Amino acid sequence: MIIRSRDALADARSNKLSKWTKAVGSAKERIDQLVCVPGSAQSFANDPSDSIFAIGSCFARNVEERLELAGANVLSRNVQVRNLGVGSARYAGIFNKYNPAAILQELRWAASEEEFPLAGFLPTSDGLFYDAHLRRTSGDSDKETLRKRREDIKRYFSQAFDADLVIITLGLTEAWYDHETGHYVNEIPPPAIIRESDRFGFEVMNYESCLRTLRKVHSLLLSRGRPGLRMIVTVSPVPLIRTFTNQDVIVANMTSKSTLRSAALAFCEETELVDYFPSFEAAMYSEPSIVWEGDRRHVTDFMVGEIIRAFMERYGFAPAAESLAGGYEFFEQSPEQKVIGKFKRETKLLKQRIIELEKEIQNRRALSD
């Protein structure tokens, strides 16, 4: 769309964050603070009592945990799914949905628009089956047990239709398609199955496909959800662990994130009560040593906390927490000292939690003995 030149100049003058350098609040100035959560167009605010449901990649799990810790009403933290011996559903990653098509499919099953295909349970090497629409580590069992767990999962995702705000975290565009069921599986099927037949195909979802899928997700949520439903779309900063294209994984990852980011922007601009929040950009433009865990894939809990703090302040929820640096010291310290102080305090809290969990495990072992 081409707009009038005078309108473009007016937009630039009114945009306080339009300059990269040589201005108060310039991009350079904000990036130099080490933690930078960029601004974004905001079309609505929330009430602190609003309910939230987060769906998408593993970064969605980080987001919902931080929101709940800050006192928000997070429906997607209400987990009642049977355990198949692989630990909690949260840590098994049962609810992670990495590409836009997987998100749409799960919501369609939750809305009873489609029946979950029993052929979606794939055989394992031990004579059991696993749910190909969950993570491979979600547990193996017989088909009847997996079918019953699917009922639990359906009830879990149906909570999205009770939420005031749905947060969608887009992960990647590389996807595996099941020609037999007509659905996208959540992860690559076992290599043995791929080698034996042409049942599965590989696709890199393009811009048009991602945008079309986001529109369908929104339409479904509007038709089944609460009146006045609002949505936040964000892109996970967590990169591909491996690409199945012939590109360098770094290039493939940037292509994936750029495609999702472009589709998300177009979708948000054309849709009322839908905003984009720059989680991906926050990770890309903040200090790398603060953003990333040692594997250079996962975002530190500290950085997730900073992103959620900015989100809650901008959208009218209760502040996530007082600055971990505390009081006047926050303003008297240098930017580097402020960030290091926060990081040390955050690390201390996490260590305390680990100690508590270790004690809990010891107590359970003692009781079982």
Image: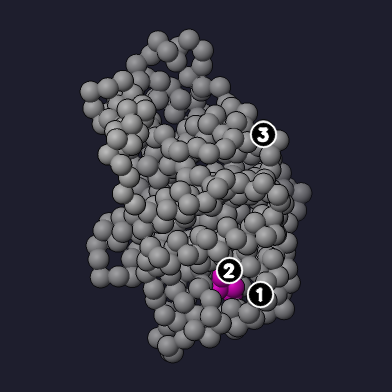
For label 2, the residue is 105
What number of labels is visible? 3
- State if disc 1 and disc 2 touch (CB < 8 Å): yes
Query: CA–CA distance between discs 1 and 3?
Result: 33 Å
Query: What residue appears at the point 40 percent right and 25 percent down from the top-left corner?
Result: 339
Say left or right for 61 vs 251.
right
Residue tagged 1: 114
Residue under pointer 3:
47
Element at badge 1?
loop
Q: Secondary structure at mark 3?
A: loop
Q: Is residue 124 left or right of residue 240?
A: right
- Across and down, in percent, residue 137 comes to 54, 65
Compared to residue 241, the image places residue 367 above or below, namely above
- List x then y, in percent, for residue 108: 63, 68
Q: Which is nearer the eye, 101 or 198? A: 101
Residue lying at 66% horizontally and 75% vertically, measured from the top left: 114
Identity of the amino acid at label 2? Gln
The disc label shown at residue 354, or none: none
User: Compared to 325, does 194 lie above or below?
Assistant: below
- In space, the residues marked 2 and 3 are separated at their CA atoms by 30 Å
Q: Secondary structure at mark 2?
A: helix
Point out the stretch of residues depicted in magenta.
Answer: 128-133
Of label 2 and label 1, which has the lower sequence position?
A: 2
Q: Is residue 297 magenta?
A: no
Please identify the quarter of the rendering in which residue 262 is found.
bottom left
